[in-house]
Amino acid sequence: MTDTGRREYAGIDYFRLISAFLVVAIHTSPLTSFSLTADFILTRVVARVAVPFFFMVSSFFLFSKKEEVCEQSGRLMAFVKKTAELYGITILLYLPLNIYTGTIKEWRHLPNLLKDIVFDGTFYHLWYLPAAILGACITWLLIKRRTAGQAFGISMVLYLIGLFGDSYYGISEKIPFLKAFYQGLFRISDYTRNGLFFAPIFFLLGTFLARKRKRLPLRTCLSGLAVSFGLLLIEALLLYKLHVQRHDSMYFMLLPCIFFLFQSLLLWEGKSHSYLRNLSMFIYLIHPAIIVAVRGLAKAAGMQKLLIDNSILHYIAVAIGSLAAAAVLSLFVRRKPGRTAGADHTASIGSRDRAWAEINRTNLNHNVKAFQKVLPAGCEIMAVVKANAYGHGVVPVAAYLSRIGIHAFAVATIDEGIQLRKEGIKGEILILGYTPAVRAAALFHYRLSQTVVNLEHAKELNRYGRPIQVHIKVNTGMNRLGESYRHASEVESIFACKNLKVLGIFTHLSASDSQEESDVAFTKQQFQNFYGLIGRLKAKHIPIPPTHIQSSYGVLNYPELKCSYARIGIALYGVLSTTEKNTKCSLDLRPVLELKSRVVLVRTIAAGESVSYSRSFIAQREMKIAVISIGYADGFPRSLSEGKSHVLIRGHRVPVLGRICMDQLVADVTGIPDIMRGDIATLIGKDGSEEITAEQVACSAGTITNELLSRLSDSRLKRVFYDL
Ligand SMILES: *Cc1c(COP(=O)(O)O)cnc(C)c1O
């Protein structure tokens, strides 16, 4: 969700407190006086949800927002700093106990001290704080640098490594190389339940749930929870009875269990109880000291039988003592979290305060994979990223595509190509438009491939004297750029240019989007023209470079063509040019961009009052209207004025009134409760069950999505990238 910050989750807050008391149970074993198995179930199974839950809560609020990486890193830094400070203070507070128990002696050996600080915690429960720091950092790197699938895979592998050094160690121990591996590992960290192996998967799950729009229905959550908890119980008891466990923090079934538990809690919305956050954290941090205090006091008062030996009473005494101490501590530090929360709020809004475009990298990845599946073997995607990647933000888009294995890009102009090179994009970059030979030095310097538009152009480029990479464009019927397919000898002369390195030969289709008979015939004629020329070149023993013909519709309507590249633009961004979805092969494409803005003012107008320029809209009755901070200078077309467009606010589809202005527009929000300043208005994208597609907007504006998207303002709209 984009507005996690504004929703309140009472269920999550209550469960923080429950989790804190579960952790106290882990360290006091309340049921041992009755039955060891019952105590095992309570403290080693049920209570084991507490720490993963805390990890998930942290990431749920830390990485919830779709926002610029720099803003996210700011929040991460704040989290790391806060947690590290807390850790520093608690290390000092527990120092007397370290002295008392003698651990401090081990720290004379520096590696021991480092090991405790980074992984194991300087006191037994304190491992949680460095684990939270490490887990948050790893997760941040994963979501920044990897696709959602890769991030999940990596954190899953880490969890598995942890698992087989924890609850399943009895198995690993029997396999010599695993045993050696883990023994090496245990030299660095006493357990695998640390920030490296244990935390990342839960941090990632928290991030995933924060960004997911749809919630599972309560019934599904609860049955999922019941089933996975049942299985968790079986798993844990089996491992326990078989004596496989070295430690008992990590189980397979803990993952689905926490996943469903957290989802169930999210459905419990209501006023949040922020004081419970500090309270539960303090209970967590302070209870080991309270345990020592309770024991000391019980001994001094001769009440060992009551307060120590009776495990239930011992637990209750520690729980009450911890709660009281935590409540006192909370009183002292109450103001501080309020202040940071405020700062957090403004920081997270940042680039999303007026109008912005959200770019979903996971969907981009999905579309790439969808095309790779239909393209014949040997045909590579040449990602067309001209015009600021069709308005999506060229540098981050190209960088992401590079990372997921795209090696060829197409741009429209030399300057677009240079920009990509300066940003470190490797591989082939083809300039589809004309570049005059005066810029040959830049073509050479940045290793850009230039489209040769005819023989004359080739000769001019050739005169530069140093090797320039080119693709030869052939005109087969579009009559835009390209040497005529009829001119085999001219094309031969281009191949003969000494300083041109011919890396490709291609043509462009003019009616590949149409299934109409005459258009199909025309397109097939274009294929024949192209391959006819290729045949003649072959006959002249010219080695044929890589070929390419299709753009998006070329692939969707003629997937059978066997070329070296497919130049895919619009469809890579998950949309087609028009609302007409009828193509020969229909791929599951997912829109990558959402266009959003904010309500900046809500007012009521009386019947007879007009709205916006020219008074073209006159209210027939009393109306509530909302001013939204986006206009045609942002790229939302003015031709959508006079009732031709809608926006989504709070899941409602509402009409835009009167003229669209340069920087603002006005929507009719009559009858929609609770609308207020700061609400998000979606112009392209989904909100709740409503959706406005780019195709619909383009159609209403009398254009195609290619134009609509490529004209989204580069300077005004921030592109906010996110995964999942
Ligand atoms: C823009 C362009 C493409 C990409 O077209 P889409 O329809 O967006 O896939 C391909 N080839 C050439 C020559 C182009 O100009």
Image (cartoon, rainbow, N blue to C red):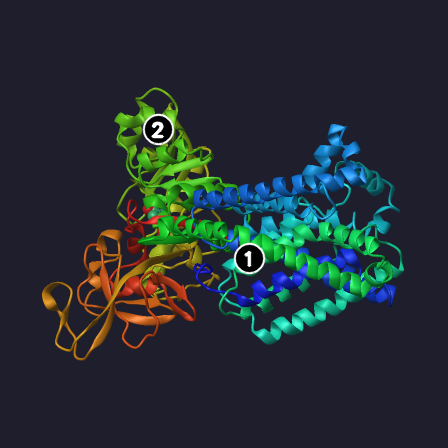
Disc 2: CA contacts within 10 A as few (<14), some (14-19) or many (>=20): many
* Residue 463 or residue 428, whichever sits in front: 428
Q: Is residue 724 visible?
A: no
* Residue 217 or residue 370, whichever sits in front: 217
| Amino acid type of the residue that numbered disc 2 sits on in the rendered structure | Leu
User: Judging from the image, what secondary structure is the residue with disc 1 in?
Assistant: helix
Based on the displayed image, in which of its 4 quarters is residue 573 positioned?
A: bottom left
* Pair 1/2: label in front: 1
Q: Residue furthest left?
A: 614
Label drawn at residue 277: none
**Residue drawn 70% across the image and 53% down it:** 287
Residue 502 percent location from the top left of the image? 41, 32
* Residue 204 or residue 11, whichever sits in front: 11
Q: Is mark 2 within 8 Å of ligand 1?
A: no
* Residue 280 or residue 212, whichever sits in front: 280
* Left-right relation of 171 to 437: right
Q: Residue furthest bottom?
A: 621
The CA span between labels 1 and 2 is: 43 Å
* Left-right relation of 67 to 236: left
Quick check: marks 1 and 2 in contact, CB under 8 Å?
no
Label drawn at residue 208: 1
Based on the displayed image, in which of its 4 quarters is residue 687 positioned?
A: bottom left
Residue 346 percent location from the top left of the image? 39, 50
Q: Is residue 336 visible?
A: yes
Circle 2 is placed at which residue position? 443
Q: Residue furthest front?
A: 301
- Which badge, 1 or 2, is on the more N-terminal residue? 1
* Left-right relation of 383 to 85: left
